[in-house]
Image (cartoon, rainbow, N blue to C red):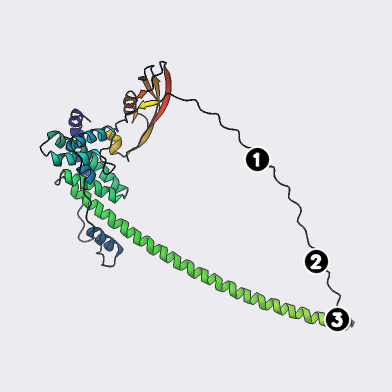
Amino acid sequence: MSQHTLTALRPVAALALLGLLAACSPKQPDAATGSASTGPNDPATAAQAVAADTPPKPAVAASVQAMSADDLRAAANTALSQNRIYAPGGDNAMEYYLALRDKQPDDPATTSALTDLMPYTVIAAEQSISRKDFEEAKRLQALITKADPKAPALPRLSQAITSGEKLVAQQTTDEASKAKAAADAKTKETQRVAEQAAQQKQAADALAAQQRAEAARAESARAAAADTPPAPRPAAAVERPAPVAEAPAPRPAAPAAASSGERRLLSAPPPRYPMDALRANTSGQVVVEITIGGDGDVTNARVVEANPPRLFDRAALTAVKRWKFEPTGGISTTRRTIAFNPG
C-alpha cells in the first residue's frame, strides 16, 4: 500500500472509528442492580486470578524486532499487498510498522501508516470479541496499545474483553453444574432400573420354581394312577434355517473422465477487501470469466456470478486484470472463483 493510498484511506478510517466509538461506548453498571460479587472459590474468579498472574505477551514478536529497518519496511509493504494488516501474529503490517517505529521514531511515513491501519485493527478486535476469541482480541489490543497508548477505543475494548471472559467463565461453570446434575440423575435412574429388574427377576424365578414343582407333583400323580412310568417326551425337532441367497457383487463404477488442462497462472495479486464488507464482517465469492491474450496478460474480464451481488465485483475485476498467465501465443478464456473472507 503506497503512501498516497494510506493518506486517502485516513478520512474513511477515522469516520469508521468514530462510528464504532459512538455505537459501542462502555455503559456504567447500575449501582442498584449490579451483579453480585464472586467469592474466592468461584471458577470465574479463579480463572481471572490465573490470567492476572500470567505476564502479557509482547505486542511485537521478537523475530520481528530483530529485523533491520530495510527488511521491516519491505516486509510491511508485502504484508499490505497481501491484506495481512493485523494477522497472523508475527507476520502482519502492524507489527512490522511498530518495530520500524522503534528503530526510526521520527519517520513520518511509518507514523502515518500506523494511523491509517489503526481502525482496521480496532474493527478486528471487536469482531474477535463477538466471536469470543479473547486471546486474539488481547493480541490485537496489545497492538493498539503499542501504537497509541491513549487510543479512545482501548477502555471499551478492555471492558468488553473482561466482561466477555467473565460471562464465558460463568457459562462454563453453569454448564458443568448442569452436566453434573444430569449425570447424577442418570446414575440414580440406572440404579432404580437395575433394582426394579432384580426384583422382577427374583419374582419370576420364584414363580417358575413353583410352576415346576406343581408340574412334577401332577406328573407323579398321573404315573401312580396308571402304575406305569410316564412316557419319555420326544425330542423337539431342530429347525434349520433356510439358505440365504448371496447378493451379487456390485459392479465397479466407471472411471471419471480426466479434465482438460488450463493455462498456468504465474502471478495472482490478491484483491483488496472492500471497507464496507470488512466492517460488516461479510464474506462472499465472485465467479469471473477471463480472456487471456497470447502474452499471458488478461485482456478482458467480466463477472459471471457473485454472492452477494455487486458487493465484491469491482475488487474482483480489479484484481484479475493484474493477473499474469503462462504465455502460449494464443487467446483463451477461463473462469475463476475469487473468495472473500474477512477472517
Residue at 71%, 79% in the rendered image: 210
* Three-letter code for the amino acid on which mark 1 is drawn: Pro
Instruction: Report the quarter where the N terminus lies.
Output: top left
Residue 77, label in figure: none
Relative to 107, residue 267 above or below: above
Residue at 55%, 74% in the rendered image: 195
Instruction: Count every numbered label the image shows and give the total.
Output: 3
Residue 309 in the image, given as x and y percentages of width and height: 37, 30
> Mark 3–mark 1 contact, CB under 8 Å?
no
* Three-letter code for the amino acid on which mark 2 is drawn: Ala
Residue 223, label in figure: 3
Residue 236, label in figure: 2
**Furthest residue in direction right, as rendered:** 227
| Nearer to us in this view, 323 or 308 | 323
Relative to 207, residue 237 above or below: above
Instruction: Report the quarter where the C terminus lies.
Output: top left
Looking at the rendering, which quadrant does residue 338 occupy? top left
Residue at the disc numbered 1: 250
> Mark 1–mark 2 contact, CB under 8 Å?
no
Query: What's the distance in space between the residues labelled 3 and 1, CA to CA?
Result: 63 Å
For marks 3 and 1, the one nearer the N-term is: 3
Relative to 191, residue 136 above or below: above
Residue 249 in the image, given as x and y percentages of width and height: 67, 42
For marks 3 and 2, the one nearer the N-term is: 3
